[in-house]
Amino acid sequence: MPLIKELRQFKNQSCNEGYLTIYLSTDQTSNDQQRGEWKIRLKNGLKKIEKYIEADNEATIKAYRHVKKKATEAIYAIQTELPKSIVLIASPNGDFFLRKLQIPVENTFYWDNEPKIEQLERLSKEYPTEGILFVQKEHVFMIETSLGEINIERLYNLEIEKEDWKQYDGIAASERMAKRANHRDKYEQRFEANQQRAFKDLANTIQKEADRNKWSTIYLVGEQGLTTEFEKQLLFPTVKIIDKNYKKFSSKEIVGQVLAS
């Protein structure tokens, strides 16, 4: 389930004892973060809340300290694999939600009767649901992303009749060498004709997916000739082409590269 849908489950929930909501920047590419700045921010943010509720009854303070301890332990447990940021929502009644994010957040800490998801709702507009298509000659890799998260990964393979190359040696090889270029041209023409039809069919499938999931943008990545050809088959208002080969990249890395472009 996409992150924003998960968090909306908290929207109408409340707890008299309180909800702890944390948005914490943990980007390890930042020089400050490499020195453990996030630990200081976490400690100070939680300390500030405790100081603020000192005037409340003992039960509230006890509940907060219990949730604070659980939250701190959970965050420290993932300190060797921290992403750009994290969001945490927890309450004394057992609700606990911790998610790593690949987008920056504003450091904020809340203790209130309701969880605070306004920042994520705002970020969902900045990082809406989008589709990334890594177009290659014989397959297309699709990623649906929102809030920097991967919602869907899907591989479409193009099944096409393959030429069975037979090996020739000696004189037979040299005699057939002259015919080879023409033979390859005919093969390529047939391949490209089939590919064009396949792109059109797949574009229709992608279009339905984009409309159903309300994509705001489709990114086409890969070799320019292939992305340009695929774009011709799409009837979508916002299509952006990125002429880069992400063949050796993971899905997470592809999303990061596209969002940073």
Image: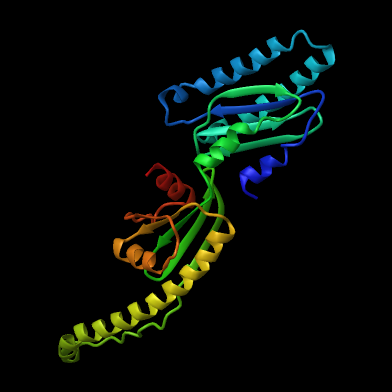
Figure quadrant of the C terminus: top left
Relative image position of residue 58 (x, y in whole percent): 83, 12
Query: Residue 176, position in %: x, y?
Result: 19, 89
In the displayed structure, 92 sits above or below 121; it is above
85 lies left or right of 16: left
One can see residue 239 in this view? yes
Relative to 216, is 14 above or below? above
- Residue drawn at the location 24% of the way across and 88% of the way down: 168
Residue 198's place in the image compared with 81, above or below, is: below
Rendered location of residue 119, percent (x, y): 59, 32
Would residue 112 appear left or right of 136 to someone viewing this image? right
Q: Which residue is drawn at 59% across and 28% down?
A: 23
Please tell me in which quadrant of the rendered image residue 78 appears. top right
How is the rendered protein coloured?
Answer: rainbow
Q: Position of residue 172 (x, y in %)?
A: 19, 91
Q: Is residue 242 left or right of residue 92?
A: left
Q: Residue at x 69, y 31 (%)?
A: 89
